[in-house]
Image (spheres, rainbow, N blue to C red):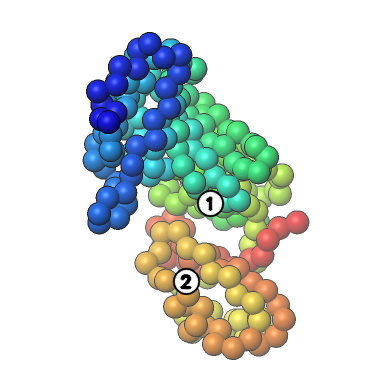
């Protein structure tokens, strides 16, 4: 049967889960879904309530004004996005599982860029996809390390469900040899490499700077940009 021939008006609620994979893999264009997003939205608008499951990478401009958009993560991994109709049009929400914890958008302006403080917060993927980093930054009384990077920095450690906190011990310009020497000096044996705004592959860097453990210390390295400059931030989970 062709679902696009179904009249959804007589139903109390409609749920549409379009196919988002084709013969060549994942489909990123919502109009290439089966059925297309435009049909699903039209079907949703004819029913009192509706939910459309979409890819978490859906562009915000593709979200219709009549829908509430919710991005959902589980254990830090973004799983899906849902467009809800008949509830709160225009609302943007990030929901984190387990919990659940739900962060509502308030239309805040972009957070200010500020110097790197004692703590770095890595927002949950659902928060980033939902463009709600400003809400988290306000909650933490923090700012961004760079206007294009979704890392929040602050001077105080505050509990939050929406970001993971790290205590920063070092800030260095990107330099492989200097990092390798520092890890040897501090007897690091466990290295976690994260990146945002860097072209360097974390696993490749890890092999170069720590080919074998020097001790039992653990360090997290963030490859990123601070005020536009390639930077390495070293630290460890806070608390």
Residue occupying image coordinates x 53% and y 36%:
94
Residue occupying image coordinates x 56% and y 55%:
116
Residue at disc 1, secondary structure: strand
Identify residue for label 2: 202
Characterize the local packing of mark 1: few (<14), some (14-19) or many (20 or more) Cα atoms within 10 angstroms: few
Mark 1 vs mark 2: give the one in front: 1
Characterize the local packing of mark 2: few (<14), some (14-19) or many (20 or more) Cα atoms within 10 angstroms: some
Q: Residue furthest front?
A: 1
State left or right for residue 2 relative to residue 211.
left
- Give the vertical position of 144 relative to 189 (above or below): above
State left or right for residue 6 relative to residue 147.
left
| Residue nearest the viewer, comparing 139 with 127 | 127
Identify residue for label 1: 77
Query: Can I make out residue 127 in this image?
Result: no
| Residue nearest the viewer, comparing 117 with 123 | 123
State left or right for residue 109 relative to residue 136.
left
Residue occupying image coordinates x 40% and y 49%:
148
Q: Tell me residue 129's x, y (percent).
A: 45, 42
Q: Tell me residue 55's x, y (percent).
A: 39, 42
């Amino acid at each position: 049967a062709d679902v696009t021939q179904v009249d959804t008006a007589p139903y109390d609620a409609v749920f549409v889960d379009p196919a988002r994979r084709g013969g060549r893999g994942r489909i990123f264009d919502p109009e290439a879904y089966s059925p297309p997003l435009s049909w699903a939205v039209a079907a949703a608008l004819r029913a009192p309530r509706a939910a459309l499951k979409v890819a978490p990478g859906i562009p915000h401009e593709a979200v219709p004004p009549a829908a509430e958009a919710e991005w959902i993560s589980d254990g830090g991994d973004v799983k899906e996005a849902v467009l809800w109709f008949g509830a709160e049009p225009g609302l943007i929400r990030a929901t984190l599982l387990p919990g659940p914890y739900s962060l509502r958008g308030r239309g805040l302006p972009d957070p200010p860029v500020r110097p790197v403080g004692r703590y770095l917060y890595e927002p949950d993927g659902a928060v980033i996809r939902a463009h709600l980093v400003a809400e988290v930054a306000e909650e933490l009384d923090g700012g961004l390390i760079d206007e294009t990077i979704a890392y929040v920095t602050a001077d105080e450690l505050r509990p939050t469900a929406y970001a993971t906190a790290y205590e920063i011990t070092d800030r260095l310009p990107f330099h492989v040899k200097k990092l390798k020497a520092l890890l040897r000096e501090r007897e690091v044996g466990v290295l976690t490499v994260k990146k945002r705004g860097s072209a360097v592959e974390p696993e490749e860097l890890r092999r170069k700077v720590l080919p074998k453990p020097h001790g039992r210390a653990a360090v997290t390295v963030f490859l990123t940009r601070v005020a536009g400059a390639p930077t390495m931030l070293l630290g460890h989970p806070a608390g």
